[in-house]
Amino acid sequence: MDKQPFTAFGLSPEILKAVSKLGFEEASPIQCQAIPKLLAGADVVGLSQTGSGKTAAFAIPAIERVDPSIRAPQVLVLCPTRELTMQVAEDVAALALFKRGVRELPIYGGSAYDRQLRGLREGAQIVIGTPGRIGDHLQRGSLKLDRLRMVVLDEADRMLDMGFRDDIESILSQAPAERQTVFFSATLPAPIHQLIRKFARDPVTVRIESHQTTVPAIEQTYYEVDRRSKLEVLCRLIDLQDISYALIFCGTKMMVDELADHLAARGYRSDKLHGGITQAMRERVMAKFRRRAIDFLVATDVAARGLDVDDIEVVFNYDLPQDADDYVHRIGRTGRAGRSGRAITFVAGREIHKMQHIERLTRARVRREKVPSAEEVEAKRADQFVEGLRELLEKGDYQHHDAIVDQLLDQGHSATDIASALIDLLTRAGVRDVAPRAEGGKPALRPVVAEKAEKTADPAPAATERKPPERKAPERAARVPPEPPPRSEPWLESPPRRKGRPAGSSRNKGGPVSHERGMTRLVMNLGSSAGVKPGDVVGVIAGLAHVPREKIGAIEVLGHQTLVDVADDKATMVLAKLTGIRFKGRQLGIGRAR
């Protein structure tokens, strides 16, 4: 079955709004088959592998069936492990976000009973849990199934393999006979057939065939990376491997927007494609990518259809695709016309099982690689700088400054010290490398467009990690932004008169010093004339300098400048991280307001 938009299923506006917020553009094959049948009230047996989108296939109809006025369990989802229980609960919460009065509750072993009991007393309507702990609550009398409308067995084959058959039969026996019963499983062994015959009523089978798919001769690798570290690893790989032309796939429109903005803020020539962009804009972006006016195109699977480019160097799977077919379609966009191609995939946490499944179905070896360290990236940048400088010296295609050099030599400085000081000055100014250019016969100093790699631990997978490790920025001189047109006060243009106070602002408008205790006022050389908005400022500071949002204070966007308050202890880091980056298509100057 072809994929369809979620609007084709007659879903409620609240569910469609949640799906749109999550950024999904169309339903997967299992969702297209299962959702209409479940909405119609049929018992369903779904045969689908992990990673096919089956959670939304049963969660959306389950949420639609809940009556918010009834404060009792109406949907029960059984999962084999607590990890899957938590994952399903998170997905249900995201899909039910706009359904007022609908609450979900995860119940699993190893978690305190108090919170679970409180959630049941407060009337959670969708209960997700492991068979063992659900059975405990039934025995205690804390969980009652008399108002139950739907029971879902997720990964039923795994639950039977883990010895939960007796628990499952006990739970299903206590559920109302008129309930809707749903089985999702990768396989259908005899014990599951027996459960289906005993507890399901005229079930409809939906099946997504796991056919083997061949892939072209492409070098395939993957990196096991925590979700929070993907951006850092992506930039490291681009810099370390000199990648200059790549297609980057994300799973949702929201992720495309976020990643494209981060890459642009770091100075990479990038743009985005997804279903929320007008056709005219999509054609312009694709034309830019074909003529290499941009180096990195961030896209969803839907938006990238019809993109026919022969010389894409690398395809990145920033988010793992739903199924093997999508994976093959993605990576097939590199290595065309007899050229070699590469595919790099990021795998986070439990997604390793999806990656192994894709390997089996594609009959291809996807080599696991170690995440490059910050030191490797820095060493590569140093080598590039030296090579560019050597090439420039050999060609002699640069402007001579003999008078300045002679003056410094006359003052007693050695040639070695002068050269070292100059290289250090260039490094502080954010210059990545020096290379001859044909334009005007002058060399180009290319700024460091990516965030400078810090000496932190490698971004490795960490399922329990809640926040990224704190990074300490190297001390370097902050460059003062270019002066605006002459005014009575050179550090600031006169703020326009406005009614009310915009979000992110404070009473302290139009001054070089923050009146908020513990805050330093910084000034950027870009303002509303460059399209800067307060949210852009928060995003670039939080994203590149890793400054918590609570450490960012008042923001005043003027015509040609922007004032922003940051915590005193973060000011130096912000200056070091943001000086010289590309922001809103221009080089950003930032300094302390004076």
Image (cartoon, rainbow, N blue to C red):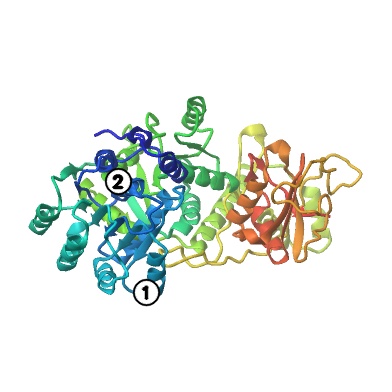
Of all residues, the one furthest to the top in this rendering is 280
Q: Amino acid at mark 1?
A: Tyr
Q: Where is residue 76 shown, x and y percent of the image?
A: 29, 58
Residue closer to the observer: 289 or 303: 303
Secondary structure at badge 1 equals helix
**Residue of label 1:** 113
- Tell me the residue at 61%/34% (across/down): 438
Q: Amino acid at mark 2?
A: Ala
Q: Which of the two marks, 1 or 2, is nearer to us in this view?
A: 1
Residue closer to the observer: 66 or 94: 66
Residue closer to the observer: 269 or 340: 269
**Residue of label 2:** 57
**Residue 192 position by quadrant:** bottom left
- Tell me the residue at 58%/54% (across/down): 543
Secondary structure at badge 2 equals helix
- Residue 227 relative to residue 351: left or right: right
Q: Where is residue 219 shown, x and y percent of the image?
A: 32, 47
Residue closer to the observer: 539 or 172: 172
- Residue 415 relative to residue 268: left or right: right
Q: Where is residue 375 shown, x and y percent of the image?
A: 51, 63
Measured along the vertical axis of the image, is residue 519 above or below residue 99?
below
Q: Please report whichever mark, 1 or 2, sits nearer to the chain's N-terminal start.
A: 2
Report the quarter where the N terminus lies.
Answer: top left
The answer to whether residue 12 of the structure is visible from this angle is: yes
- Tell me the residue at 48%/65% (across/down): 466
